[in-house]
Image (cartoon, rainbow, N blue to C red):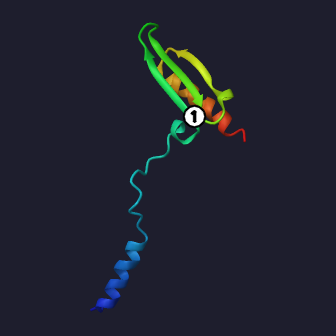
Amino acid sequence: MKSLRQLIRIIIKEEVGRNIRTVNNDPIRFDKAADFDVDIYPDSYNNGWVCTIESKLNPELNDNERFFPTEDEAIHYSRNYIEKYKNRS
């Protein structure tokens, strides 16, 4: 039988490797990680979706409202727009 000291060492080694501070293991969304504010909302008048992109650091990168027929197209456009300027540096 193992001594109490050996048992405590085994438990401590196991616990040191755990990260109890990580609450959310999901990947960071593209619109939250970059320095942009992305707004995508439905447009009931035109039966589609509107996407606006604003840069927090550089107002020259702001994009005016753009109309898209589906929400997926608006998300795709905003993701590509942000990636283009995020990878430029």
Q: Residue 21 appears at what percent x and percent y?
A: 40, 60
At a point 58% along the width and 28% down the height, the residue shown is 54
The residue to which callout 1 is attached is 36
Q: In the figure, 76 relative to 19: above or below? A: above
Mark 1 surroundings: few (<14), some (14-19) or many (≥20) residues within 10 A: many
Q: Residue 84 appears at what percent x and percent y?
A: 67, 33
Q: Residue furthest left?
A: 1
Q: Residue furthest top?
A: 45
User: As rendered, which of 29 and 52 lies closer to the eye?
Assistant: 52
At a point 42% along the width and 73% down the height, the residue shown is 16
Q: In the figure, 53 relative to 33: above or below? A: above
Mark 1: which amino acid?
Answer: Phe
Q: In the figure, 1 relative to 88: above or below? A: below
Q: Residue 37 appears at what percent x and percent y?
A: 54, 32
At a point 57% along the width and 26% down the height, the residue shown is 53
The image quarter containing residue 2 is bottom left
The N terminus sits in image quarter: bottom left
Q: Residue 63 appears at what percent x and percent y?
A: 62, 23
Label 1: element kind: strand
At a point 57% along the width and 34% down the height, the residue shown is 36
The C terminus sits in image quarter: top right
Q: In the figure, 61 relative to 16: above or below? A: above
The image quarter containing residue 9 is bottom left
- Tally of numbered discs: 1
User: As rendered, which of 52 and 80 lies closer to the eye?
Assistant: 52
